[in-house]
Image (spheres, coloured by chain):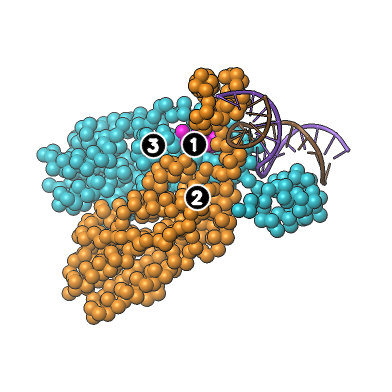
Chain colours: A cyan, B orange, C brown, D purple
Amino acid sequence: MNMRPTIKDVARRAKVATGTVSRVTNGDTTVHPVIREAVEAAIKELGYRPSPIARNLRRGRSGIIGFVLADVTNPTYSAMVPEVQELTREAGYTLVVMDSGMDPERERRNLETLAALRVDGVVLNPLLPVDTTIPALLQGIPVVSLPGVPEWEGAKVRVSSTDATLAGLDDCLANGHRRIAFLTIKGLGGTQRDLLSMMRERIRAAGATFVSDASWTFMSREASTEALPAMLRAEGRPTAVLTASALLPELLIAARDAGMKVPRDLSVISIAASTLADAYDPPINCTTFDHEHLSSEAICKLLDTMRGEPWGEAEEHASFYLRRGSVGPAPA
Amino acid sequence: MNMRPTIKDVARRAKVATGTVSRVTNGDTTVHPVIREAVEAAIKELGYRPSPIARNLRRGRSGIIGFVLADVTNPTYSAMVPEVQELTREAGYTLVVMDSGMDPERERRNLETLAALRVDGVVLNPLLPVDTTIPALLQGIPVVSLPGVPEWEGAKVRVSSTDATLAGLDDCLANGHRRIAFLTIKGLGGTQRDLLSMMRERIRAAGATFVSDASWTFMSREASTEALPAMLRAEGRPTAVLTASALLPELLIAARDAGMKVPRDLSVISIAASTLADAYDPPINCTTFDHEHLSSEAICKLLDTMRGEPWGEAEEHASFYLRRGSVGPAPA
DNA sequence: CTGTTAGCGCCTTCAC
DNA sequence: GTGAAGGCGCTAACAG
């Protein structure tokens, strides 16, 4: 059990003081070249690496940024992990990814752990509806919420799929659909309610029916296993469905089990992209947005907040509607 | 900017020494009940939480376990994140998830970061072929490899899909397929080569042809975008394909673009499950294994190794072949 | 330019 | 059963 070399070992080996070694490892330019070289040699020979723990203790920061994901297995946000990791690394932080597994309980625990770890910042992809007691848990740690929820205090990055979703809706209406459903995860915030009323209006204007009651509009992933087959079996069943990407697998499974083909018997639009939407036959129409741009904005905002700068208002991020093969004319 | 309370603040408030506070926070039983209560009250009033950084510095450990994933967006392993996180949390560690994004360069950097962080242990889901210089990077930090690669020194958890894959192959042969392809990620290790020769033999015994040359058998995800359409267009094209789950999306897309229907024109088996395999129409036959059991074994092994216990030989983990709708009779 | 020193917050002997 | 003190590895302020 040979201990790792410390700054003292290096200092002794290079015959200098620990302070000098510290200056070298921190890139201080005011070190005599000869001494610097001697120190660097000693570092190399000993295989010395400064302990981030001691360093962080001294500096009063952890050097860690936490990224709490509502659900790692949901590609919509987990696709941003690589980008976020890279950006934080460049800024000199280590990214800790945590998964809430769609469980509010776990989300709380994750944030508590991060607070206990004294992380320097948090990127939060919150469960919805957002838990308003979260800011208390975080006791002043800078946070950026992704996507931004209106109820939330603090920096946020808004990604609104409103335009793209409405474009999808128009596509359905133009294809003659008159019974349209909208599936989204339980208990969404204000933005979604706005979207809902905009959709409602547009549907009425087209003389169509919005197939939606509480159990269809807002549902949990588990509930959907029962609710979706029922929806597709019902008398006034929809001929077109716009669904949150998290519910797309369940919807497609329900359609398949009901013997329905897309888009012959059912038109489908996914709100947010996924591998499934890309690879399905036919490819599923979906809304999408610029992931890279979004994550870099999130990290920039977080870093700004960490520097104590006030956060500007969240700008909306544009989203796009991809027209592919999953919307067809309404069945007769 | 009010600093967080330290152990000193608590000691002062409770009129005791810091040592006593420390004993309380560490659940030392040799503390007088009255004092203990006073300390606990002070802790609550101040909202005190011991700094893990200082604690870890003192204890000479980081309290962190790293989980390096070859690719977060690959559900086969990212599905284990929740389980692994839970298990490490129960063992008193914080899990740091990192993503290598299928890039050897990033994998190296991640491991270097973890080494610099002085993590107490690493769960590694390595890129293949495995980088044999990795143990050097980790300088004695306990590691468990998942899945275990033969070339690897250290604890490992083996998950062999051999049996299930052979079962899938038999299914194809029984359905009259005579030209069969096997798609897997570039540069696999010894286990896979064994599997390959077993398949070869079984195929010959059945009088069938193994459609495989270097470019089809081992391919990168990017290369597949060109290679797969070419494979499906070729003269002696396969009528059945067994594919690593990472290549399933590309295969299905290529088939769709070629106007082929599964299983009418092409039978497909995915090695490892995915949402796509579940939700596709028809559902894709696949091999699978017991994720929970596997991750808990990985963590147990890691914890054992961290305690200095020798690791036993890796037992094989059973896998299963799920018969669904993607294998049909060979086209005439 | 470089050495010395005083802690960062905590745990852990060692006395009492 | 509890207080006092030293030190984990490092950095930053201050001398020299």
Residue A106: mark in rendering: 3
Three-letter code, disc 1: Leu
Which of the chains bears the disc numbered 2? B
Q: Residue B307 carries which label?
A: 2
Q: Marks 2 and 1, how far apart in space?
A: 26 Å
Q: Nearer the viewer, mark 2 or mark 1?
A: 2
In the image, what residue type sits under mark 3?
Arg
Q: Which residue is drawn at 31% across and 76% down?
A: B200
CA separation in Å, label 3 and label 2: 28 Å
Q: Would you call the spot at circle 1 few (<14 residues within 10 Å), some (14-19), or many (20 or more)?
A: many
Q: Is residue B251 left or right of residue B89?
A: left
Residue A115 drawn in magenta: yes
Neighbor class of circle 3 (other Cα within 10 Å; few <14, some 14-19, many 20+) is: some
Q: Are marks 3 and 1 on the same chain?
A: yes
Q: In terms of sequence position, does the residue under pointer 3 or pointer 1 come before the other?
A: 3
Residue, far left: A235
Q: Which of marks 3 and 2 is in front?
A: 2
Residue located 20% across and 59% down the image: B324
* Chain letter belonging to callout 1: A
Can residue B306 be seen in this snapshot?
Answer: yes
Q: Hey, which quadrant is residue B108 in on the image?
A: bottom right
- For residue A114, the mark is 1
Residue A217 in percent (x, y) is at 25, 35
Confirm whether residue B113 shows in the render.
no
Residue at screen point 60% across, 21% down: B16
Q: Using the image, determine if residue A221 lies above or below residue A37.
A: above
Q: Position of residue B142 (x, y in %)?
A: 51, 54
Q: Where is residue B170 in the image (x, y as percent from the top left)?
A: 23, 70
- Comparing A206 with A117, the one in front is A117
Q: What stretch is highlighted in magenta?
A: A112-121
Q: Quadrant of the N terminus of chain B?
A: top right
